[in-house]
Image (cartoon, grey):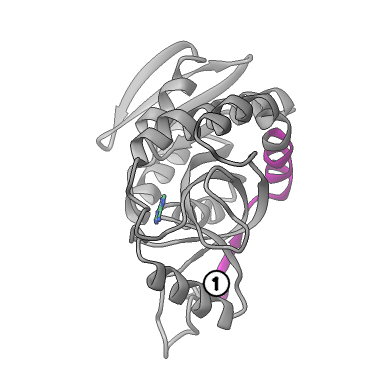
Amino acid sequence: MTLAIMSALLDEQRGLLEQLVSPQRVKRAGRTFWCGQWAGQDVVLVLSKVGKVAAATTTTVLIEAFDVKSVLFTGVAGGVGAGVKVGDVVVAEAFIQHDLNSAPLFSRYEIPLYGRATLDCDPLLSALLLEAAQLGLVGVGDHIHRSLLLEAPKVHRGLIASGDQFVCDPSAAALLRTDLQAAGHEPLAVEMEGAAVAQVCHDYGVPFAAMRTISDRADAQAHLDFSAFVSQVASPYALAVVSRFITLRPGK
Ligand code: ADE
């Protein structure tokens, strides 16, 4: 029952890679896949690459060539929901593509021929991930958020919106949010890959769960100290949560 762990960023993946027993490197489709064991479970680590198409390709290769039976995604995101602050974590309940619009052929955001706009994450895997985030972040957050003057991390659960766009303008973020709300969707965060991974997993019937650490508020400061945030906050958070997730996960 191989578990795939996809990361958006190299820094984040590095800590996870150190946990692998007998890692084997396999190259496919211009991507590097790391196969090994973690706490006695077969896992494959890979970088998603950036954007929806790249992430969809990575997911397809994971399923077709590595026969993975579940997919876990860790990365960072811009917070757009009320009360979703830098340093918080969002565990995805569902994904939507905020840049998908085939109107008037289909309603706004609807994935053509799927009859829906949102794709749910796997409820069991996501419940485990939520528990792993709540338990795993307890000790880890303390010294990190104090040194960066962040508040203690809150773990949120809800909708994440993906699109091929780094959102770094408050009016763009506000418009994106109000347009989604007008269609009945309440996004907590924006990023660039999750909805694509969710769609491929949906097509293959492979369970999928995702967490994102909030690195910015999708405003003009969004690009500042991005790499520092990833190495000092998102990477230790990902390691803490995934380590806990692996020990909670019953399937081998
Ligand atoms: N990933 C992290 N922050 C982001 C943002 N503001 N927009 C899109 N993807 C992101």
Instruction: State yes or no: residue 150 in magenta.
Output: no
**Magenta-tinted stretch:** 114-132
Residue at position x 25%, y 35% in the image: 30
Indicate left or right for 222 with 125 as reference: left
- Residue at position x 59%, y 45% in the image: 88
At x 37%, y 61%, the residue is: 167
Q: Is 20 situated above or below 64? A: above
In magenta stretch: residue 115: yes
Asked which quadrant contains residue 166, the reply is bottom left
Residue 3 in sight: no
Tag 1: amino acid: Ala
Can you identify the residue that label 1 sits on?
Answer: 117
Q: Residue at x 67, y 36 (%)?
A: 133
Q: Is residue 138 left or right of residue 8?
A: right
Q: Residue 183 versus residue 198: which sits nearer the camera? A: 183
Badge 1 marks a residue whose secondary structure is loop
